[in-house]
Each structure stands twice: as C-alpha cells, then as structure tokens.
Image (cartoon, helix red, strand yellow):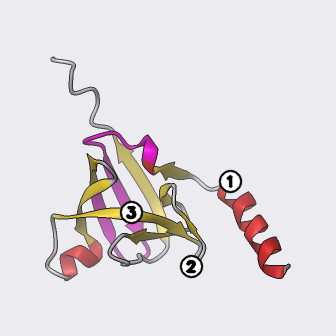
Amino acid sequence: MIARTSLKNLVGQIDRIPAVRKVDLALGDCLIVNTRNSCYRLVSLGNGQFLVSGGWFEKAGMTGATTGINGCTFGGTVIHAGLAAGQGLFLEFDNNVRTTRIQRFRVIQQGDPAVVH
C-alpha cells in the first residue's frame, strides 16, 4: 500500500512540473537540456530517435550518437516514459545513461519544413 500511495503522489507532482513530452517534439526540433553537471543537445530525427551531443556522450567520445529517450525519473526506478525533459527530474536515454537533475530545458522548433521563405 505504501508503494501505491507513493506512486499516486508522484503522478500528482508530475502534472505541476514544467516539462516537454516526446510527442510534442517534431522532426528537426532541438531540445537543449541543462542538468546539474552538463548540457545536452538533442535533435529530433523522428520515430523516437534523437541526435545527441554534450554531457556523457561527449565525454564518452560519442557526440552525434543516435539514441532514444526512455523518459524521466524522480531519481528512482519509476519512469515517466512520455517525457523528454522535466525540470527537477533525471533524463534517461535508451542506452541506460541517466543524467543529473535537470535544471532547465528549452525547445527550439524547426518550424514547418514545407514553408519556403
């Protein structure tokens, strides 16, 4: 019963956190995520895949890696699979790399590629 109550409290908190959902990121959109220790740049490639640079990927010599996002956590094992970033949460990539706590994030929209200027 304690785990159920805790999960219910987490779900209630998630609605009040500034966040961006994965489904809200269009092809070419850029997500900049500043964590406690690093900065990540993620460009949406579609189909749940992102071109990632910065942070752990840069340190591991994997800048420009293509990866997915598992979601965001409060630091434990409960994951919100729909989130790409949430202030105060931890971002988890599909290679099981988990960032330090997200301080802020910003979405730079690619815009409509069908529009010619």
| Residue projecting furthest to the right | 1
- Measured along the vertical axis of the image, is residue 55 above or below residue 67? below
How would you rate the neighbour count of disc 1 (Cα within 10 Å): few for under 14, some for 14-19, many for 20 or more?
Answer: few
Please name the residue that numbered disc 1 is placed on: 16
Lower sequence index among marks 3 and 2: 3
Q: What is the CA distance from the residue labelled 3 to the residue labelled 2?
A: 15 Å
Lower sequence index among marks 1 and 2: 1
Please name the residue that numbered disc 3 is placed on: 69
Please name the residue that numbered disc 2 is placed on: 75
Specify the amino acid type for callout 2: Gly
Specify the amino acid type for callout 1: Arg
Quarter of the picture containing the N terminus is bottom right
Q: Give how far across and how far down residue 61 sits, in percent.
A: 14, 79
Q: Kindly report which numbered mark, 3 or 2, lies closer to the viewer in this rendering.
A: 3
Residue in the picture at 33% in, 62% down: 68
Specify the amino acid type for callout 3: Ile
Residue in the picture at 30% in, 43% down: 29
User: For the residue labelled by badge 2, is the local secondary structure a helix, a strand or a loop?
Assistant: loop
User: For the residue labelled by badge 1, is the local secondary structure a helix, a strand or a loop?
Assistant: loop
Residue in the picture at 21% in, 27% down: 113
Lower sequence index among marks 3 and 1: 1
Q: Image quadrant of residue 73?
A: bottom right
Extent of the magenta region:
23-42
Q: Kindly report which numbered mark, 3 or 1, lies closer to the viewer in this rendering.
A: 3
Q: Image quadrant of residue 66?
A: bottom left
Is label 3 in contact with label 1 (beta carbons under 8 Å)?
no
Taking the image as shown, residue 28 lies to the left or right of residue 37, namely: left
